[in-house]
Amino acid sequence: MEFSLALPYPELSGKITNDELIELYDLYAGRFSELTAVTTYSYQSVIVNDCNLSTIFEKIAESEMVHLSKLAKAIFFFGGAPVYAGKYNYFSGSYADYESDLKQIILNNAQGERQAIYAYKQLATRTQNQSLCELLSRIAMDEELHLNLLEKIYNEINICE
């Protein structure tokens, strides 16, 4: 089972605007961010009462950690300090999703992946920096993989009931 595509992440070059840098912070450690995804999936990998699903959540968290690292490096490359903060606030543990109902967990995770895909694609289309566009598009591809996996799991759960 794949949790990340076997494609390289592009090297960064050039410059970006301050507005783009602020948006990177939000993708990195804002309310709906990679750091939120890492903490959510990590929590869920512990609380779910299904060994297979626990492993899946753990592997998705690992993929999200790679994205977190790529965004930290992008923030630093473009002149920022990769502190755990979004546009408005420092990261908070309250951002993680502490849902315990399995079906709702999967629905919430799928919605989070949809939001991430949308946010990455939006910034990718707005930036004038080609390398940043390619990085954001590459990360969005992994998020699409996660979404497809979650939708498959949700459908399997519904079939079993």
Image (cartoon, rainbow, N blue to C red):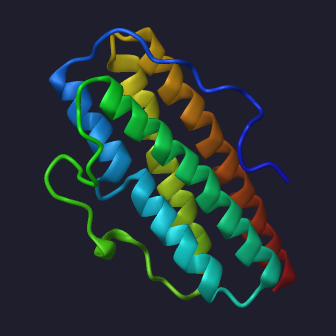
Q: Position of residue 17 (x, y in %)?
A: 20, 18
Side of 128 where 4 appears, left or right: right
Q: Residue at x 42, y 23 (%)?
A: 124
Q: Residue at x 59, y 29 (%)?
A: 138
Q: Residue at x 80, y 48 (%)?
A: 2
Q: Position of residue 49 (x, y in %)?
A: 72, 91
Side of 115 where 89 appears, left or right: left
Is residue 33 among what the camera can see?
Answer: yes
Name the quadrant of the N terminus: bottom right
Front-lying residue, 120 or 67: 67
Is residue 12 placed above or below 28 in the rendered structure? Answer: above
Is residue 119 among what the camera can see?
Answer: no
The number of callouts visible is: 0
Is residue 72 placed above or below 112 in the rendered structure? Answer: above
The image quarter in which residue 104 lies: bottom right
Is residue 27 placed above or below 153 in the rendered structure? Answer: above
Front-lying residue, 120 or 108: 120
Q: Position of residue 144 (x, y in %)?
A: 63, 42
The image quarter in which residue 14 lies: top left
Name the quadrant of the C terminus: bottom right
Is residue 75 placed above or below 2 in the rendered structure? Answer: above
Q: Position of residue 9 (x, y in %)?
A: 60, 26
